Image (tube, rainbow, N blue to C red):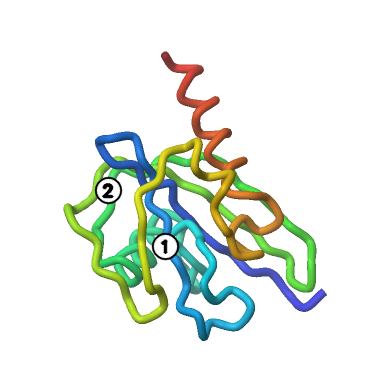
Amino acid sequence: MAGRIDVAKILLQNAEGQFLVVKKVESYDEMGGKWELPGGKMESGEDREKSVKREVLEETDLKVENLQDVVQVEVEAENRVNCYIMYSRDFTVEAELSDEHIQYRWVRPDEFRDMDWHSDAGYGLPPMVFLQKYLEKENEYM
């Protein structure tokens, strides 16, 4: 096993109950043209909240606040991947994509199953599982 990679992603929800997904540029190896949740690798010394804020700003120009933990998943593969999924509804108004992505969409939870996710989008689990974990957690408090 080569090492450990820490990754932080976000379920970012708008006022209509839709979640932000971004599509990788076609030239981005096997992940090109596929959808993913915003976020990425954590830098040395970053916690997951700081990482998500930085990655979302870099990828979409959105500033996010009031992050909540949803789930942490550890996957053993070539590298051990530690993936943290967070949630927020608090962000600036309009997304502007970086060169890493070609499109963004706001999708309803029932659309998650039909998205063409890239293989690392959920680090071994489809993003629908993360969404389901969040919805289950939310219902505990209602």
- Residue 119 on image: x %, y %: 66, 64
- Residue 140 on image: x %, y %: 50, 17
Q: How many marks?
A: 2
Q: Which residue is drawn at 45% across and 67% down?
A: 23
Q: Is mark 1 on a helix, strand or loop?
A: strand
Three-letter residue code for mark 2:
Glu
User: Compared to 53, does 101 lie above or below?
Assistant: below
Three-letter residue code for mark 1:
Val
Q: Residue at x 41, y 78 (%)?
A: 100
Which label lies toward us, 1 or 2? Answer: 1
Q: Give the CA separation, mark 1 to mark 2.
A: 19 Å
Residue placed most toward the observer, 41 or 108? 108
Determine the residue located farthest toward the top in the rendered image. 142
User: Compared to 117, does 41 lie above or below?
Assistant: below
In the rendered image, the quadrant that contains the C terminus is: top left
Q: Within the image, what quadrant is residue 56 found in?
A: bottom left
- Residue 90 on image: x %, y %: 25, 43
Q: What element carries label 2?
A: strand
Pointer 1: what residue? 22
68 relative to 66 in the view: left or right: right
- Residue 55 on image: x %, y %: 39, 67
Pointer 2: what residue? 65
Q: Which residue is drawn at 51% across and 85% down?
A: 27
In the rendered image, the quadrant that contains the N terminus is: bottom right
Q: Within the image, what quadrant is residue 68 found in?
A: top left
User: Compared to 126, does 102 lie above or below?
Assistant: below
27 relative to 91 in the view: left or right: right
- Label of residue 93 in the image: none
77 relative to 37 in the view: left or right: right
Q: Earlier in the sequence, mark 1 or mark 2?
A: 1
Residue placed most toward the observer, 45 or 89? 89
Q: Which residue is drawn at 74% across and 71% down?
A: 79
